[in-house]
Image (spheres, rainbow, N blue to C red):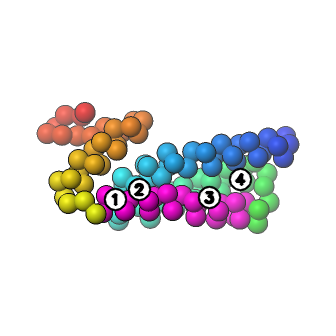
Amino acid sequence: MASSRSEVAVILGTAVAGIPQVAQTIAIVSPKNRTIAFDAAEQSYLQTARDLGCAEAEARTWVSAVMFQLRAEVDQLVKPIMLKSGAARNRFLRRTAVGIPGNQIRTKGRAR
């Protein structure tokens, strides 16, 4: 548990600063699995707030705001993907996925 409100604010601020990276990861997940990814992110943010000693109502309010921002960022990333044709969309996803740590794209049996 964090020792002061300023420490809690810094930790939660760091979580918020990571939203663009989380959004990129969720954006490349298949649409049918995206709900699962959003639920996992929400539970993770909620657990972080609880672990820091935030009251339940305060934690849920913060998580609602974070999830609103996360969903908006994912929507902005997904919109151009959905407008592209099949082959162009696949090339876009491969280029986008390369920058995500731990992500490997398999092509003809080999990881790139």
Q: Which residues are magenta?
A: 59-82
Q: Nearer the viewer, residue 98 or 92?
A: 92
Q: Report the residue marked by disc 3.
A: 66
The disc, 4 or 2, on the residue closer to the chain's N-terminal end is 4
The disc, 1 or 3, on the residue closer to the chain's N-terminal end is 3
Dots 2, 1 in contact, CB < 8 A: yes
SS for callout 1: helix
Q: Which residue does the image show at 43% across and 49% down from the upper left?
A: 25
How far apart marks 2 and 1 lie (CA) works out to: 6 Å
Q: Where is residue 109? Give x, y as percent.
A: 16, 37
Dots 3, 4 in contact, CB < 8 A: no
* 44 left or right of 38 in image: right
Dots 4, 1 in contact, CB < 8 A: no
Mark whose residue sits in front, 4 or 2: 2
SS for callout 2: helix
The disc, 2 or 3, on the residue closer to the chain's N-terminal end is 3
The disc, 3 or 4, on the residue closer to the chain's N-terminal end is 4
Is 81 magenta? The answer is yes
Q: Report the residue marked by disc 1.
A: 80
Q: Report the residue marked by disc 4.
A: 49
Q: Which residue does the image show at 54% across and 58% down from the upper left?
A: 70
Q: Nearer the viewer, residue 56 or 92?
A: 92
Amino acid type, label 2: Leu
How far apart marks 4 and 1 lie (CA) works out to: 33 Å
Total numbered labels placed on residues in the image: 4
SS for callout 3: helix
Q: Where is residue 110? Give x, y as percent.
A: 19, 34
Residue 33 visible to an observer of this rendering: no
Mark whose residue sits in front, 3 or 4: 3
Residue 77 tag number = 2
How far apart marks 3 and 4 lie (CA) works out to: 11 Å
